[in-house]
Image (tube, rainbow, N blue to C red):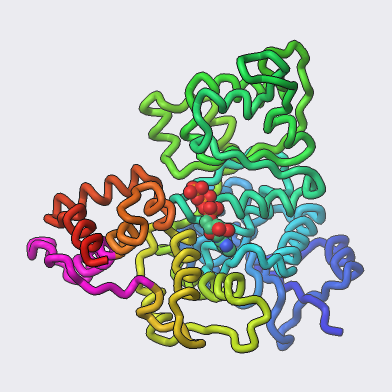
Amino acid sequence: MNSLSIRTLGIELPDDIQQQLLSAGFSLWQQGNCQPWLTLVNLSQCEPNEVAAQLTEYQAGNLVALLAPEQSELAAAAMQAGAQDYLLLPVIGESLFALVNRLRRLEQPDTSLVVAAAVSRQLLMLAHRAAATEASVLLCGESGTGKEPLAHYIHRHSSRANNAFVAINCAAIPESMLESVLFGHVKGAFTGALSDKAGKFEQANGGTLLLDEIGEMPLLLQAKLLRVLQEREVERLGGNQLIPLNIRLIASTNKDLRKAVEMGAFREDLFYRLDVLPLTIAPLRERKADILPLAEHFLCVYDTPGSAAPCYFSEPAKQLLMAHDWPGNVRELENCIQRALVMRRGQAIQAAELGLAVELLMSPEPADTGDGLKASKRQAEFQYIVDILKRFNGNRNKSADALGMTTRALRYKLAQMRESGIDVDQLLQRAGQAA
Ligand SMILES: Nc1ncnc2c1ncn2[C@@H]1O[C@H](COP(=O)(O)OP(=O)(O)OP(=O)(O)O)[C@@H](O)[C@H]1O
């Protein structure tokens, strides 16, 4: 049987580690063997500007950078240059094995998350690192980029996997109710509190709590949340008993929390408590290599189960999927595929059936925008918004949802459209008359 081989460049592993690797079934790569499974590159002698060049030479298999402790700030550059991960020197058996296990787990299929782009694979690796710790995680990314599935992934790959994963969207719950939803209440704590109720903190005890859209949490509750995180105990509203908590907190946001701190809308002390392990999910337009694998994934998920003749994308449809900007990110792509499955007339999904190919009924943008490609993209985006608004009879909330954006973001887009001379209301009225 072929064992997984490990190559080292610029360093020899201590004998005891080599022995441990051999007894765990790995082999040490030798010249002439086929591609190594893992390459450890010693960068301790490298100048910062040489890191990328050193790593790009060895892109086969998993690539891990070895850095001197004083070079730890080069970790991000190493990962950007293609390293999956990094280790600080000297190599210690324990951290090497933890790394090897992370890499192996990554290779085991967990098909819930589709990752193809290099940035996404690196993010998943960081998520594995985060999962192995108890630290709070802050997930940042535009709406619809997949913060919730990533949070769930971290939970599933953590030691808490057999306990609860509880998610709560701080923006979706009225301010007046958020406190009791989070902290629970005792009977009679307020009008309508007819019985004792555990809050989300208690429900997540032993497991993971995801506070989605944490940036929307009112300042007063932020103070209470900070206290819970410091004291690791919670008291139900109206209660007098402190309940010990053992939770891992993951917070997510599509806002720039640092800016919110500067503007006084978010507590600085809470920000630093949450920002222990920040993970940023790139917008879909910046990780194009994910688009088609995600589209295929959603096709599998939403195609008629057991269908004898599975659907596929025509070449022009693929091109259109790749060309679109996806302002609503993965959520918009998911909606698009669901819609295409309804609209399709044959097995091959055509570009026009994606709902992205648009009849350009807008007046062209003013010539002074210069860049023609940019202008036509913008036009296509505006047309898409109008199409969705038509479908939902102008309902802003439903349309925003289908577009994968907040209602506020949609209003902003509509204002932009008005500014560029597009009378959205008139277009909708015309569509209503035609129907
Ligand atoms: N990498 C992925 N693989 C598979 N599905 C994904 C992936 N990323 C996102 N999705 C799916 O895309 C949809 C949108 O993701 P999600 O709702 O988690 O976005 P979000 O970043 O939490 O958005 P919001 O900030 O609006 O809450 C979900 O149905 C999610 O399952």
Does the magenta segment cover residue 369? yes
Residue span colored magenta: 355-383
Query: Which residue is at the front of the view, 433 or 226?
Result: 433
Report the side of 82 relative to 184 (left or right).
left
Which residue is drawn at the image coordinates 13% and 63% (left, top)? 365
- Residue 143 drawn at (x, y percent): 45, 50
Up-down relation of residue 115 to residue 58 (above or below)? above
- Residue 285 drawn at (x, y percent): 40, 64
Which residue is drawn at the image coordinates 62% and 24% (left, top)? 180
**Ligand 1 quadrant assignment:** bottom right
Report the side of 74 relative to 265 (left or right).
right
Q: Quadrant of the C terminus?
A: bottom left
Could you tell me if residue 106 is visible in this image?
Answer: yes
Determine which quarter of the picture holds residue 359. Answer: bottom left
Query: Which residue is at the front of the view, 91 or 214?
Result: 214
Could you tell me if residue 78 is visible in this image?
Answer: no
| Residue farthest right in this picture | 23
Query: Which residue is at the front of the view, 235 or 117?
Result: 235
Determine which quarter of the picture holds residue 22. Answer: bottom right
Which residue is drawn at the image coordinates 61% and 53% (left, top)? 150
Up-down relation of residue 125 to residue 135 (above or below)? below
Does the magenta segment cover residue 20? no
- Residue 82 drawn at (x, y percent): 54, 67
Which residue is drawn at the image coordinates 61% and 15% (left, top)? 191
- Residue 367 drawn at (x, y percent): 8, 65
Up-down relation of residue 33 to residue 49 (above or below)? below
| Residue farthest left in this picture | 367
